[in-house]
Image (cartoon, rainbow, N blue to C red):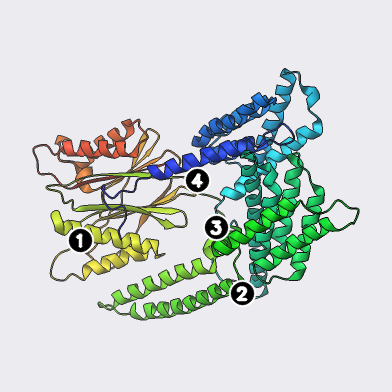
Amino acid sequence: MMEHTTKASAFNLSKIKAVRVAALMIFAWLISRGVFLDGYFPAAVAFVAYMVRRKRLDIWLVIPAAAGILPYFRRGYEPWGDLAAVILCGILFAVSGRIKLETWQTAAISASAGIICTSVSRLVTAAVYEMSVKELLLYGLLIFVFVFVFDTLWEEKGGVSVRSGRTAGRRGQAFRASSRTAVYTAGELRAASLVSVSLLLLNGLGLSFLSWPVVLFLAMAALAYLDPGTAFLTVAIGGIWTGVTGQGQWGLMATAVIGVATAALAGKKGGFVPAAVLIFTCWALGMAESGVVLGADNYCLLLSGASFLAVNWKFGGKLEKFIATYAGKEKPEKAEAGTKAAKLLKARAEDMEDLSELYSTYLDSRSVVAGQFDVTRQIMEDIRRRISGSARLAGSRSHEKFEVDISVAQCAAAGDINGDCCGWQDIGDGKVAMIVSDGMGKGKKAAAESLMVTKTIISLLRSGVTTDLTLKMVNAVMLMKEDEDSYATVDLAIVDKCTGKTKFYKIGAAPTLIRRKDKVEEVKLSAVPLGIVNGLKVRYVETVLKKDDWIIMMSDGVSDGGVAGGSGRSDVFLSMLKETAAGVRSTDTRTMSDLILNRAADSYIGKERDDLTVLVARLS
């Protein structure tokens, strides 16, 4: 099924953005309601600082964060320092958005802002006596830690950099072992962040009394689906959490640690066995006359045990899958099956490579088969890479830095059928491909050719085939039509949303405009359209785009215009389009595409019009 090929089928991101805004608003409000150290709100400061550092436009999160803190003034608290720190961090990281900061730097700056604002507010309100240096430092430490919690929660799964290539001998084995260790460490961190955020939300809802039942529930889930190490970590976080929220129950924490250790020694015999051992051990310690404050409240054990029993019975498979996926761990049998499948795909890909090399030696039509074998090989390699997990490990990209807002405007030469076709789609690895194709002539025939080209190119790119081979394959397919002339232009742009690097491929296509602030430049490449000559040479122009940069792709009907400035020169009309693009002050891509299209359509008044297509993208 083809996606994003016409204006009517253009994907609208407004609903997704609305859901994101609503979810972030509720999340920010809830975690900002959590009180620590009997009067501090470090989670609010850390969340606003981290989110605004990731994306400056998220400065609006200051509002729900402040809304979560404000009601506490009526409860006898005076969180002026926290409010000031939230506002200061929002402004500070919004202003310095172009400066690249590591997570620890963001954490240190936000912690310093929290300490400074709180100290100043206490001095102004003459409430210094209510604050100790130990409390203040612990407050800053909590902000620092929460920034890392949010970073772990929001980061792209993975975090281990692995270069592609072959590694041999002991050195390769050591490297793979270290990679696995790094993945497991990342899994523990993600599990820790999940526990922390769960307790944060619980605190924001005013249900802190349920902290230990939730901790025990998560510990049982870790024992059943992960490993004892994660269960120990869950209990430790629960103990620390209850301490900083003023509900310290160190005896319960010690009881839970002993229960986890006992469950681990009992062995993993299914989802219910370790959970039952943990609950029984905690109950038995509470019943024993040991003189030590051990054991757990019966309501706590009953609630956590019953909840785990019900959830595991009804949603055990889904819960296991979620925890394993989030923590980056799989069952041994699943991992082994994935490894076998990856080895099988690798062997078959090598067979396809041998066949591709064999058929590439022919100079007749059989050489086309070589490309087909090579396409198959690359698709197999892409699937193997994803199954084996190298896609999760590849690259050190923590998250996508940019969003790409795209709009398209089209106008047919006559009637309702436009001979141009355009489309865009995420093709994996944080990249989005955008394409405009102009079929030969007008009407249904041109529309069919451009649709075939657009759909094939996007599908192959999404399947992992290289751009070079994709374009050569489509060219070979179009050359197979012996009874009629058939060609189509290709204007292809591939944007890396993590780095901003963009490649422009032009096969007989019109120029592309790039707007950087108020300056507009052209991207040109000379090449004949697809379907005319054999042995296509693929070239591209690469540039690095920044936030608020624009890409304006168009068919030749738009770039040439119908007037050409009265001189018969298409470059004159293109200069007019550049002036139009530079003068647009709106940040809406739809506005830009409509203005460019209208300028081109007006130039055809009284003349025969060509098909018109404008695709506009903006990095935000």
Look at mark 2 in the image and give the residue it sits on. 168
Amino acid type of the residue that numbered disc 2 sits on in the rendered structure: Ala
For the residue labelled by badge 1, is the local secondary structure a helix, a strand or a loop?
Answer: loop
- The numbered mark, 2 or 4, whose residue comes first in the sequence reads 2
Residue in the foreground of this view, choosing between 86 and 108: 86
Marks 3 and 1, how far apart at CA = 38 Å
The residue that appears at 75% across and 40% down in the rendered structure is 244
For the residue labelled by badge 3, is the local secondary structure a helix, a strand or a loop?
Answer: loop
- The numbered mark, 2 or 3, whose residue comes first in the sequence reads 2
Using the image, tell me which numbered label, if any, was put on residue 401: 4
- The numbered mark, 3 or 1, whose residue comes first in the sequence reads 3
Viewer-nearest of labels 2 and 4? 4
Amino acid type of the residue that numbered disc 4 sits on in the rendered structure: Lys
Quarter holding the C terminus is top left
Q: Residues within 10 Å of mark 1 (few under 14, many from 20)?
A: many
Look at mark 1 in the image and give the residue it sits on. 487
